[in-house]
Image (tube, rainbow, N blue to C red):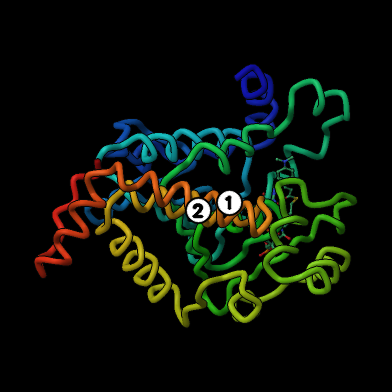
Amino acid sequence: MNTLRTLRPLASRLQPYTLPRTVRQFSATSSRSYEYLLVSEPKPGVGQVTLNRPKAYNALCTPLIDELNQALDAFNTSDSISAIILTGSEKAFAAGADIKEMAPLTFSEAYKTSFIESWSRLTTSVKKPIIAAVSGHALGGGCELAMMADILYCTERANFGQPEVKLGTVPGAGGSQRLTRAVGKARAMELILTGNNFSGVDAANWGLAAKAFPTYEALMEGALKTAETIAGYSRVAVMAAKEVVNKSQDLSLRDGVEYERRVFHSLFGSQDQKVGMKAFAEKKKPEWTHE
Ligand code: DAK
């Protein structure tokens, strides 16, 4: 909190752009307005957060990340939301962290204020699945934000990259780790050392994206369809599924399989396991209780 209070004046001095008041959106979930986000519930059970800082290609300044954390927290704790879509505009998912905010920082300022530590909450606090729908630029922190999501969808022409080397720095929000795990060391090393961009078609071919869609409209339709499918299942099972898949990134195979088995056993304690299996045996549609 102190960090954000310290950084806000710096950010607002360097980034005077704010949306007109009339464009600010109200979230049905949190009933609050955001300056850099649009928040909606496009279908029952589906929450959508749209990054909305068009004049800077959705560059991820600290106040935007702060709002993003708040919007995601609101959907995470909502009783009516099961899946979340995180998107930007057709032109840009996000062009990275805000370079103008970072440029003047000294080591001691960054260190003492834990600069952009708030990014780490994005990966730890949300237990419901997040689908990133990426069109246009997803560079630096924008690429890293997309890779933090549970499912990454993009357009074929999406423009991904980790260009930090061109700014005299390196990826700082997990890019070197997640990109390497997703596309392999050879490709990740080449991309990070050259700062070269890669397309949505590449992202899908290399396994970074689950799918690349031919158009922006098809992307948003596809993301919504997947979110609706997920929202149609037991929220308990969905959250457990996200948890066990994510464990595969941290644990050895043996420990991961054991962890999965423990979670599988624990789900016999949920009502929805009984609901689901009884409905199958009776050839009925399950009526989930989310308990
Ligand atoms: N930051 C600030 N402003 C940005 C921006 C950015 N990343 N990207 C674009 N803009 C602004 C431009 O300055 C310009 O503003 P005005 O001049 O109009 O005021 C406006 O957006 C339009 O940009 P361009 O005029 O450049 O538009 P073009 O179509 O010619 O080019 C572009 C679009 C996206 C290819 C280009 O703007 C570009 O290359 N942008 C920078 C991309 C980049 O280098 N991204 C990496 C940033 S470093 C960490 C967390 C995160 C990070 C690090 C640590 N921790 C948790 C520790 C992340 C670091 C990064 O992302």
Give percent across and percent down for residue 9: 65, 23
The quadrant where residue 101 appears = top right
Indicate the secondary structure of the residue bearing disc 2.
Answer: helix
**Residue identifier under label 2:** 260
User: Is 199 left or right of 26, judged from the image as shown?
Assistant: right
The quadrant where residue 289 appears = top left
**Residue identifier under label 1:** 247
What amino acid is labelled 1 in the image? Lys
Q: Nearer the viewer, residue 49 or 148?
A: 148
For the residue carrying disc 2, how many other residues have a C-alpha within 10 Å: few (<14), some (14-19), or many (20+)? some
Are the two marked residues, 2 and 1, in contact with CB atoms closer than 8 angstroms?
A: yes
User: Is 40 left or right of 275, judged from the image as shown?
Assistant: right
Residue sitting at x 81%, y 68%:
185
Residue sitting at x 87%, y 49%:
169
User: Is 112 left or right of 4, judged from the image as shown?
Assistant: right
Q: Nearer the viewer, residue 57 or 85?
A: 85
Q: Nearer the viewer, residue 148 or 241?
A: 241
Give percent across and percent down for residue 183: 71, 71
Indicate the secondary structure of the residue bearing disc 1.
Answer: helix
